[in-house]
């Protein structure tokens, strides 16, 4: 590319470039792990996030911990499935670390799958 020369000569060139950008990046967001499924402690394909499976959340509204391998303090989690009605919520967020997050679940003995990011 020469200095002073425009990157695109016309609007059609810009449109084609934007379509290619969308097709190569934005349309390919995939939450599954590299096996095409959701398994424990696997990295999402193209997000800085990992999947975790909790087989039993324990007693209602009681704190439980998940040991993660993100190597940073997570910003949140998304529940993608749960075995019973209830809500997952942060517990003691100020004590989340680069290896452990803490949650509570509003029902007893739920099984959940979540994406921690």
Image: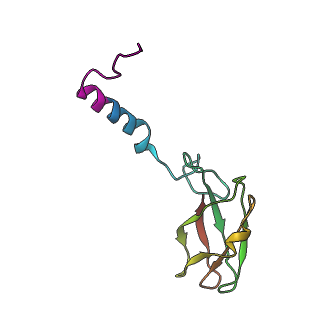
- 6 vs 43, left or right, is left
Residue 95 x %, y %: 74, 69
User: Magenta stretch?
Assistant: 1-16
Residue 9 part of the magenta-drawn span: yes
In the figure, residue 18 lies in which quadrant?
top left
- How many labels, in total? 0
Q: Is residue 75 visible?
A: yes
Q: Residue at x 61, y 79 (%)?
A: 110
Q: Taken as a whole, is the magenta stretch helix, strand or loop?
A: loop
Nearer to me, 81 or 48:
48
Q: Pick out the residue farthest to the top.
A: 2
Residue 102 in sight in this render: no
Question: Residue 92 lies in what quarter of the image?
Answer: bottom right
Image location of residue 58, percent across then percent down: 70, 81
Q: Position of residue 73 (x, y in %)?
A: 69, 59
Q: Is residue 28 above or below residue 80?
A: above
- The quadrant in which residue 4 appears is top left
Residue farthest along the front direction in this orientation: 4
**Vertical position of residue 57 compared to residue 10: above or below:** below
In the picture, which quadrant includes the C terminus?
bottom right
Residue 58 lies in the magenta-colored region:
no
Q: Quadrant of the N terminus?
A: top left
The residue located at (68%, 56%) in the rendering is: 41
Image coords of residue 22 (percent x, y) = 37, 39
- In percent of the image, x 54 and y 45: which residue is there? 46
Between 46 and 36, the one nearer to me in the picture: 46
Q: Colour scheme in the image?
A: rainbow
Q: Nearer the viewer, residue 1 or 69?
A: 1
102 left or right, relative to 24? right
């Amino acid at each position: 590319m020469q200095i002073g020369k425009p990157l695109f000569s016309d609007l059609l060139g810009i449109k084609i470039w934007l379509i290619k950008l969308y097709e190569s990046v934005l349309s390919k967001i995939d939450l599954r792990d590299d096996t095409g499924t959701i398994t424990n402690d696997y990295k999402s394909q193209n997000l800085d996030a990992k999947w975790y499976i909790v087989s039993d959340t324990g007693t209602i509204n009681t704190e439980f911990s998940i040991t993660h391998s993100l190597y940073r303090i997570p910003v949140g989690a998304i529940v993608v499935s749960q075995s019973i009605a209830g809500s997952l919520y942060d517990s003691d967020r100020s004590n989340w670390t680069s290896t452990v997050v803490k949650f509570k679940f509003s029902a007893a003995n739920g099984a959940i799958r979540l994406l921690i990011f």
